[in-house]
Amino acid sequence: MRTSRSTLPYGVEPPPARSPKRVNSRRELEDFQRFMAHTLLQPLAADDSVAPQFRDGRAMADVAAEFIRPNDRMTSLERLEVYARCYWYRIVSSVYEDCPGLRALLGEKKFDALVKAFLTKYPSRSFTLRNLCSRLPHFIAEAPQWTKPDTALARQIAQFEWAQTHAFDAAALPALTPDDIADMPPARLRVGLQPHITLLQADWPVDDYVIAVKRRESQRAEASNTVTEARTSRVRSVPKPRRGKAYIVIHRYNGRLYYKRLTAPGFSIVSALQAGQSLEQALARVGRAATVEEIREWFSTWMELGWFCRREKSRE
């Protein structure tokens, strides 16, 4: 049975039909690595044992015997299972750490099912686990059955939580100063936003919700560290947020992560500048929705936070 490309994880080449018996060339090494990777990328069974069958329908025990030798304590399949568990436990725990708000919204059982389905379709493709959740908002929209009836809210929480990861260690360029833009006419002035900034127009106050969830987790940790407190105190769960527009900027300042709420007109200006519009065009989008004094105060704050940088040519 041949493996259908449609059943493969995203961006992963099909495995060779068999593991090379010997590795005598770079091509054979690549085939061996890809073959083993496919045995690890298959989800674990319900009892966290290795999958009983390989992608092509063969028994996983027979597949493991092709490239792993048994020893006096473990069979080939058991040795493969050690690696499979290490891989899945580590990447699942990484998503758990990065998505406390999404986990709180869905509950442990539903969140666990979502994570395993997501990682089956979109396994790690980077040298760092930092990038693991970058495609999670896309997957939630692509496969809404894992988060219904809260799919839209779940996706926006996932976007917000990924934006935090991105803001924490994405690049920062030299910030523009007032002198850098003083002599440029508004019709020609185009600025870039720092690469670590994410603009999120949300239909729920997802920033307040995630902050509340983290506060609750901190309270739980404190309670569990004290025996008497753990027996007597209960930490209330965080209710779902009520629908309401929130214009959020997720950014980094002096090495620390911040979220800043903007008004709708302020968000419109920053979004237009990020999209490459001139200052004149950005201000025209606001019209009379903001006063000159308000706009001047906003730009003073944004400049102080270092949000603006020179626009990269590749973004023009």
Image (cartoon, rainbow, N blue to C red):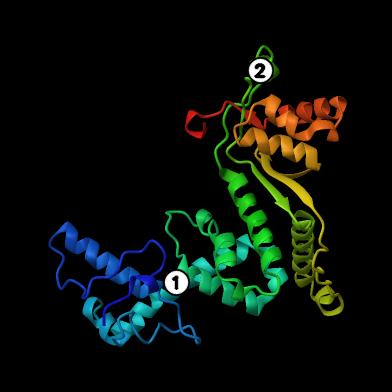
Answer left or right for 246 relative to 91. right
Q: In the rendered view, would you say 274 is above or below 96? A: above
- Residue occupied by mark 1: 86
Callout 1 touching callout 2 (CB < 8 Å): no
**Which quarter of the rendered picture does the N terminus lie within?**
bottom left
Image x and y of residue 122, in percent: 47, 65
Image x and y of residue 7, in percent: 39, 74
- Residue occupied by mark 2: 181
Q: Quadrant of residue 281 in the image?
A: top right
Q: In the rendered view, would you say 308 is above or below 186? A: below
Residue 266 in view in this figure: yes
Q: Nearer the viewer, mark 1 or mark 2?
A: 2
Answer left or right for 291 relative to 104. right
* Residue at horizontal 77 percent and vertical 58 percent from the top: 204
Report helix, strand or loop for mark 1.
helix
Closest to the observer: 146 or 38? 146
* Residue at horizontal 21 percent and vertical 62 percent from the top: 29
Closest to the observer: 258 or 229? 258
Image x and y of residue 99, in percent: 64, 62
* Residue at horizontal 67 percent and vertical 74 percent from the top: 148
* Residue at horizontal 36 percent and vertical 64 percent from the top: 12
Image x and y of residue 11, in percent: 38, 61
Q: In the rendered view, would you say 177 is above or below 118? A: above
Q: Amino acid at mark 2?
A: Ile
Q: Which mark is residue 3?
A: none
Q: In the rendered view, would you say 166 is above or below 177? A: below
